[in-house]
Image (spheres, rainbow, N blue to C red):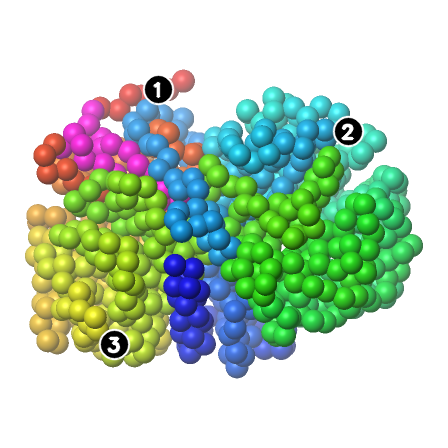
Amino acid sequence: MKKLFILALFFCLASIAGRSQTTGTMQNVPNDTAQYPYWVQMMQDPSVNFFKVQRAFNIYWQNRPITKGCGWKVFKRWEYMMQSRVLPNGDRPAPELAENAYEQFLRSNRSSTGNWISLGPATIPAPGPAGYEGLGRINTVAFHPSDPNKIFIGSPSGGMWQTTDGGLNWVTHTDTMPTLGVSAIIVDFSNPNTLYLGTGDRDAGDAAGLGVYKSTNGGLTWAPSKTGMGDKVIGHMIQDPSNASLLLAATNGGIYRSTDGGANWTQTQTGNFKNIAFKPGDHTVVYAAGSSTFYRSSNNGVSFTSISSGLPGGQRSTIAVTAANPAYVYLLYAAGDNGYGGVYRSTDSGLSFSMRSTSPNIIDWSCDGSGTGGQGWYDLALAADPANANTIYVGGVNVWKSTDGGINWNINSHWYGGCSVPSVHADCHFLGFNPVDGHLYAGNDGGTFATADGGTTWNWLMTGVTVGQIYKLGQAQLSKNHVINGFQDNGTYTITPAGWVATGGGDGMECTIDYANDAYTYHTIYYGDIYRRYNNNNENHIAGNGTNGITESGGWVTPFTLHSTDPNTMFIGYKNIWRSPNIHNTHPTWTKISDNLAGGNGSDMSVVENSKADPNIFYAARSDNRLFRTDNSMDLAPTWIDLTTSLPVASTPTDIAAHPTDPNIVYITVGNKVYKSTDKGQTWTDISLNLPAIHLNSIAYYKNDAEGLYLGSDAGVFYKNATMTTWIAYSHGLPANSKITELEIYYDNDSVSSDAIRGCTYGRGLWGSDMYHSAPVVDFS
C-alpha cells in the first residue's frame, strides 16, 4: 500500500511540472519579482492585495522548474482558500470580521438545532501508521514544567489538544474559541493551570490570528488576553523563567511584551517575527528572528537591536539555544530560493556569528540534500540539545542531525521512510526538547512525533487528535457510514461500516462514491488526477492531463461529478468540461464537450453540477467569475449558454445545487450570500436574509423537507426551509467557527428519520448529524 501512496505522489509531481500559470490583474509589484520570491512576504502580510500576491508568485515561477518541496503546493493551497474570500478588488477581509458577524448572529438567533458528532479519523487508517500518512498538521508543542507525560500541541486550524499520559489519549477544550488556529503555547512554570495560547496559523494562514488567549483552569475555558496587541498571528511566545508575569510574543506585527501576565501588551519592536528565545540562565538577554534580520535585546525585551555581524540574511530564520552552553546561539536560514541558507552560530550570546555550513540542502526532500530550493518559508525548525551544545536538529521536509555544531549533517528521518532512516511525516514545523525527560518532539503536517534516542526511533503520538484538514467528501447512498474524504497532505481516507481505511496518497481533493454500487469510489489529487478503486483495491488512474486522451489539467481542487442517473458516466471540470460514458472500464474514453467557453484564458473550472430533475441540464462555474449551462449535456457537442451577465455579483460561485425535482430551480452560494433562480440561472433572487457576513462554501438541498437548504460556512452550518422566514444556526455539537468545506446528505430508503448530513471541516475532520426535524429552540439570553 505504501508503494501505491508514493507512486501517486510521483504521478502528481510529473503533472505539476507541465502546468500553465494564470496571470493576476494588479501592478505595482517589485521589479525583481522574477528573481526573488517576494510573494512569500506578501502572502503573509494581510494588508497586501491578493491579486498582487498572485501576480508576484506567477512571475517568479514563470521560467522555473517546479519540484517537490519547493513551496509551490503550499502557495496553491493558500491561493485556493483565499481567492473566493477576498473582496472583488482583491483586498483581504480583516480576520475578526467573521467572528464578529457570527457572534452578532447568535445574539438574536441562538439555536440548539443540530446533533453533530465527530466521525474522525482519530487514528491513521490501515495500513498505517507510516511516515507519509498522518492526521493533520501540528504547529507547536509545549510541555508541563514537571510532569513529562503532560504535553500540549497546537494545530493550524484544529485548536489546542492536551494529554496527561504521554500521548496515549488526548482531549481538546478549545472548540468554543473564535479561531481554531494555534501556533504558540505557554504553560506557566509557576502555576501549570495557567496557559497562554498564541492564535492564528504562523506558517500558511489556515486560520485567523486573534492575538493571545489565556486560561486559568488548565485549558477548560479561555478568555482574550490581548489588550494593546489586538488581532495578531502569534508565531511564538516565551515566559521569563524568573518572573512568571513577564511574557514576550513574536507576532506578524512585531514583538510584544507584557509585564502583567498577558493582561496588557506593549510593542517593543516592529516587523514580522516567528521565533523568540531567552538566553539560558540570563533573562535579560533575548533573541528574536523570523525574516532576514536577527534581533537581540539586552534589557529583557524592552528594546531590540539588529545584529548583522557574520550573518548573510535570507528568506526566513529561526533560533535555537542550549543550556549546555548558554553563550551559544544557533540561527538557521532559509535562502532566497527557500532552500538551505545555512546554519550560523554565535559563541558570544548573539553579538556576532560565524557560518557552520551552507550545504548540503538539508531542508529539501532528498536523502542526501542534493535537491535545489525548498519551502523554508513554510516549514523550518531548529533545536539544540540542552545536554550537548554541539548536537542540533534541523527540520524542513525531513529532519537532519549534526553532532559537531552544524558542520556535518546526517539525515535523521525521511518523509516516507526511505534513506535507511525512520519514517516521519513530511514538512516539519516544530522541533523542541521536553525539559523534564529530554525527549525530542517534532510537529509536522502529519502530527506529533517523539524520539527518546536521538532519532534512532520515532513514535507517532496523535491517536485521538481529530485535526484533519479535509477539502471535500463523498457520501455513499447505500450505506450511511461510508464516506470518502480528501485531506491536505495526508491522502484520501474512507470511513466504512468496518472503520476507516486508507484510499489514496498525496493531497486528497474532490472525491465521490458510486450511488448505485458503492464498491466503486473515486478520489483525486491536485490538478485533476482521478483514481478509481473497487472495494478500496485495484487502484486505476482513470483521468488527468495526459491520461486516456485528456490534454489539460484543472484547478488545485478539480471538480467532477457522476451523471445524476447513469453512474457509468462522469463529468470533469478542467479548463473545459470532459465527459466519459464508461468510467468502469480499465481505460475510460474521454471527450471534451466544451471548447474554451467565452475565451477561458487558461482559467479552471471550479464547480460542476448535473441536475437530477433533468440530467440533460448541466452547470459549470469557472474561476474567472463565469457561469455556464447546457440543456443537452449528453449530446455529442452540447450547446452552452453563458449565464455570466446574470450573476448577481461579479464573483465565482463557490457551490451550485440544482433542485432535485424542478428542473428550473437552481441555487448558488457566492461569497457570504445565497441565491435562488427559478429560470435555470437567467435571473436570481437573494435569499440570504439574516445570514451573517461569513463566507459560504457549500449548499445541500434536502428533498425530505419543504425546500430544506443547508449551508456550510467558515463558521459552521446554517439551515432554512420554506416555512422559515430566517436562517438558523444548525451547528449544535460542532466546534465554533469550524470551516465546513462541503456538505452531503445520506437518504435512508426505509426511514426519513434515519437520513443524515455529513460535513467535512478544514481542521477538525469529518462530522455527522441527523436532519432538521422540529422547530428551533430560541434562546435570547
How far apart in space, not on screen, are marks 1 and 3 (Cα)?
A: 57 Å
> What amino acid is labelled 1 in the image?
Asp
Number of the front mark, 2 or 3: 3
* Residue 378 position in % (x across, y down): 59, 58
Identify the residue under disc 1: 779
Could you tell whether 77 is left or right of 223 in the image?
Answer: left
* Residue 733 position in % (x across, y down): 37, 29
How far apart in space, not on screen, are marks 1 and 2 (Cα)?
A: 41 Å
What stretch of residues is rendered in magenta?
752-774
Viewer can see residue 666: no
Mark nearer the N terminus (1 vs 3): 3
Q: Which mark is residue 750?
A: none
Identify the residue under disc 3: 548
Q: Quadrant of the C terminus?
A: top left
Mark 1: which secondary structure?
loop
Residue extending farthest to the bottom is 63
Mark nearer the N terminus (2 vs 3): 2
How far apart in space, not on screen, are marks 2 and 3 (Cα)?
A: 64 Å
Number of the front mark, 1 or 3: 3
Residue at figure coordinates x 30%, y 36% from the top left? 768
Q: Which mark is residue 244?
A: 2
Image position of 612 with respect to 744: above or below: below
> What amino acid is labelled 3 in the image?
Asn
Number of the front mark, 1 or 2: 2
